[in-house]
Amino acid sequence: MNWYLQSGKDSDVIISSRVRLSRNIEGVPFVQKCNEEELRSINSKLKEIVPSIGYGLKFIDLKDLDEISKQTLVEKHLISPEFAKSKNPYSAIIINDEENICIVVNEEDHIKIQVFSSGLEVENLINLAIEIDQTMEKLIPYSFNKKYGYLTACPTNVGTGLKVSVLAHLPALTITGNIRKVLNAVNNLGMNLRGMYGEGSKVEGDLYQISNNQTLGVTEKEITKNLKLISQKVIEQERLARKFLAKKSVDLEDKVYRDFGVLSNAVKLSENETPEFISSVKLGTDLGIISELNDTKVAKLMLETKPASIQKRVGKLLSIEEQEIERAKIVKLIIKEDE
Amino acid sequence: MLCQNCGKNEANIRYTQIINGDKKEIALCSKCAKKLGVDELELPINFNSFLGDFFNDYAETEFLPMLQTNELKCKTCGMTYSDFINTGVFGCSDCYEVFSNPIDSLLKNLHGTAKHVGRLPNGKAEKIEIEQPQKENKANSEESDKENKKKNLERDLEKAIKEERYEDAAKIRDEIKEMNK
C-alpha cells in the first residue's frame, strides 16, 4: 500500500509529512538562465545517475505524462500545480513505485529531493532525504558556498535548502473558532501555517500546512526539531478542541452522521462540497463516532474523489457533471469496501 | 440564496475578503460579480514579485547609492541587480558573490542571519534524532539515560518476539548490540 493510504503516527491530526531539499549542479546556471543545451544536459545527467541512486527510482520525462496523470501527481501533493503546467521540455521526475520518494528535475532549481510519509514522521524523513542527498552529491557536485551554504535560485531557500512540512487536519479548531489563534501563534514562532485552498476561497476540508520559513543560519536538526515541536503543540490544541466538541456529543454525532448520510446516499457530489463532508466523517472516525469507516477508507475518500483521480480511474476525460456522478459512485464503493 | 448586491438573481459566487484576520463574505450573482470586478479575479501576483519589491525597498537604505547597486552585473550569467529585483530569483551560483553586498542585509531580514550553519557537502551526516522535551527536564546523567534506553529496548525485544514480529526484533537486537560496543 502506498504511503498516502497508510495511517501513521498521530494521523488523527497529521495526515502526512514531507521533507524537501533544493539543490543545484555546480557550474551550471540556475534553471531560469539555462539555455536549451544546458537544460538538456541537466536532464540527461540525472537520467544517467538514477540507477546508481537506488531505491527503485525511475526517471520519467514530464512531457511523456498525459494531463490527467500529471494532475493526479498534483492531487497527491507529489509535484506542484505550477510544475505540472511547466512548458520546459526537459522537466522530469524521478519516482519509485511506493511514491514516497519524488525528485523533481528542472523546476525552479535543478534538483528538488522530496520524501513523504503518512502521519508525523519528520525524523525518519529527514534522515532518508539526507541519505539520498549524500548518494547524489557523490555522483553530481552541488553548487555550494561556504558562507551561504547550498545555493538556490530563490534566496528564501538558500543555506540548508531544507523545507519540512506537515499537512494537518484541524476541524475542531475551526469549528470552535480557535484556528486564528493557532495561526498567529505558529506564525509568530517563525513557522508558516496556511490553509490548503481548493477551487474556492474556503480552506478545503479543514486542511492546513505547517512548514519552516528559515533555511539559512539554522541546522537541519533545529529545523526538524522546531517543526516537530510545533506540530505536537498543534496536535495537542486540536485534540483539546475535539474533547470540548465531544461534550456536546449529540450535536456532533448528528452533524457527523448527517454528512455521512449525504456521502453514502448522494447520486451527485460536487468537488467543492465533498472535502467538507470528508473532513466531518474523518473527525467522526477519529473520535470513534462512526464505526463504518477506518483510516485507510478515509485516506481513499480524500484522494480518490479529486477530479484527476476520478478521471484516471475511469480512463477518460469527463464533464463536470459526469465527474460528480462518478464521484458519488466511488464514495459509495469505498464506504462499502471490505477491509 | 439571492445575490447580496442586486437581490434579484441567484447567487453563485462567494467572495471572501480577509483583512488582518477579519473575514467578510458576500454572495454574488455572476452579473454583479463581473460588475464589481471580483469575477475570476486573478492578479499577476506571485511570491517573486513581492520578494523583488521587498529587496528593492531595503536596498534604498543601503550606503551604496541605488544607481551603483542597480548596475551590478553578474559576468557569468549576465544577471543585473534590477533583473533580480524584477524576478526575485538569481541566475547562477556566482550571483551570490556578485550581489553579496546588497543581499547580505536582505538575507538577514529573511532568515535572521546570513551565515550557513547546516550540513557541508561530503561531510559526515549524523543521524538526526529528536529527544522529547519532557525528558530534557530530568537532570539524568548520560549514563543512566543509556541504561534506561537499553532496558526499554530489551523490553521491546521481548515483546516483538512474543508477537512474532521478527523483523522488528532483529532491528532492536542490532540496536542493543550497537549500544554494548
Image (cartoon, grey):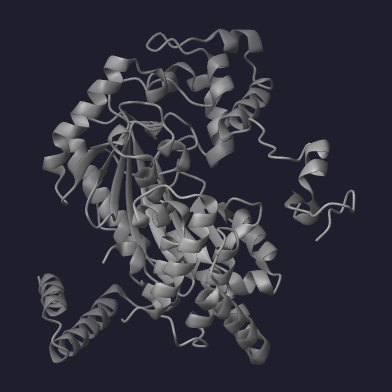
The x, y position of residue A168, in whole percent, is: 50, 64
The N terminus of chain A, quarter of image: bottom left
Residue at 62% across, 75% down: A172
The x, y position of residue A171, in whole percent, is: 59, 71
Residue at 65% across, 56% down: A202
Could you tell whether A134 is left or right of A80 in the image? Answer: left
Residue at 57% across, 53% down: A198
The x, y position of residue A136, in whole percent, is: 20, 39
Q: Does residue A161 sit above or below A119 in this rendering?
A: above
Viewer-side residue, A268 vs A224? A268
The x, y position of residue A256, in whole percent, is: 59, 81
Could you tell whether A42 is left or right of A301 in the image? Answer: left
Could you tell whether B2 is left or right of B78 in the image? Answer: right
Q: Does residue B178 sit above or below B1 in this rendering?
A: below
Could you tell whether B78 is left or right of A170 in the image? Answer: left
Viewer-side residue, A321 vs A157? A321
Residue A198 shows up from this direction = yes
Residue at 48% across, 9% down: B73
The C terminus of chain A, quarter of image: bottom left
Viewer-side residue, A112 vs A74? A74
Residue B135 shows up from this direction = no
Quadrant housing residue A304: bottom left
Viewer-side residue, B94 vs A257? A257
Q: Does residue B121 sit above or below A226 in this rendering?
A: above
Picture mark count: 0
Quadrant housing residue A280: bottom right
